[in-house]
């Protein structure tokens, strides 16, 4: 898995610095321009038109789940599954034939936090995307994070079950505050999501996971 991510990020960086005639025309000067271009070339993010990304558009659950699953190359064990089970086995509002249905099933079976009644068309908040992203990082290995609590001016607005994910992303510089605020309930933009995802891939590439404990010797 680490090797796959190394290849993906290498491809991302190579294609970004090489340039592309298929670049989005509406991201010039955007804070997430580097991340968006790189992830687009790697096939992780899509535009709403061939040359339009809409960086300030809001991310739906369908979009967020799809790009996280694709970015981390999450798949099902072929020895356990001949095919991806129908989404209706796990979710009440995810159509079986939707373009994102397989991603939802794969995310669920990898333990990513998705409620069975999640609406794929609902817009994700910043804390929801951060929580999903952090749990996706953990599918790649067990990582050691600095034991540091980052103060947020709006921490009282963070859902308790999502606080650890946000804290870990802040410590790892995958997420960042704006003048001390995280804005957890604010809908996350496509640019913000791309930036966090790009940094998460870089973190996994550059960080060695904690090796599993050796079984005790008798």
Image (spheres, rainbow, N blue to C red):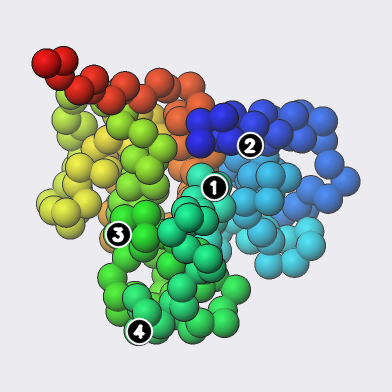
Mark 1 Cα shell of 10 Å, populated few (<14), some (14-19), many (≥20):
some
Q: CA distance from mark 1 to mark 2?
A: 9 Å
Q: Is residue 147 visible?
A: yes
* Residue 20 x %, y %: 84, 41
Q: Nearer the viewer, mark 3 or mark 1?
A: 1
Q: CA distance from mark 2 to mark 3?
A: 24 Å
Q: Which residue is mark 2?
A: 8
| Nearest to N terminus: mark 1 or mark 4 | 1
Q: Which picture quadrant has residue 180?
A: top left
Mark 4 Cα shell of 10 Å, populated few (<14), some (14-19), many (≥20):
few
| Nearest to N terminus: mark 4 or mark 3 | 4
Quarter in which the C terminus is drawn: top left
Q: Which residue is mark 1?
A: 73
Mark 3 Cα shell of 10 Å, populated few (<14), some (14-19), many (≥20):
some
Residue, x 36% and y 25% (percent of image)?
A: 209
Q: Which residue is mark 4?
A: 92
Q: Which residue is mark 3?
A: 113
Residue at far right of view: 21
Q: CA distance from mark 4 to mark 3?
A: 15 Å
Classify mark 3: helix, strand or loop.
Answer: loop
CB under 8 Å between callouts 4 and 3?
no
């Amino acid at each position: 898995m680490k090797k796959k991510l190394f290849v993906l990020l290498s491809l991302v960086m190579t294609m970004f610095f090489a340039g592309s005639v298929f670049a989005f025309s509406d991201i010039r000067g955007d804070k997430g321009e580097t991340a968006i271009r790189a992830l687009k070339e790697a096939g992780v993010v899509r535009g709403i038109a061939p040359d339009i990304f809409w960086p300030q558009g809001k991310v739906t659950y369908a979009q967020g789940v799809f790009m996280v699953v694709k970015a981390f190359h999450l798949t099902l064990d072929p020895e356990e599954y001949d095919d991806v089970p129908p989404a209706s086995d796990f979710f009440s509002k995810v159509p079986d034939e939707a373009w994102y249905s397989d991603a939802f099933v794969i995310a669920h079976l990898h333990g990513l936090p998705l409620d069975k009644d999640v609406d794929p068309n609902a817009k994700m908040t910043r804390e929801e995307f951060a929580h999903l992203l952090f749990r996706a990082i953990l599918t790649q290995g067990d990582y050691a994070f600095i034991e540091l609590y980052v103060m947020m001016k709006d921490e009282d607005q963070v859902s308790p079950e999502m606080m650890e994910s946000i804290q870990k992303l802040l410590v790892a510089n995958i997420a960042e505050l704006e003048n001390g605020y995280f804005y957890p309930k604010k809908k996350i933009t496509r640019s913000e999501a791309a930036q966090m995802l790009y940094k998460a891939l870089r973190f996994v590439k550059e960080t060695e996971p904690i090796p599993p404990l050796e079984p005790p010797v008798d």
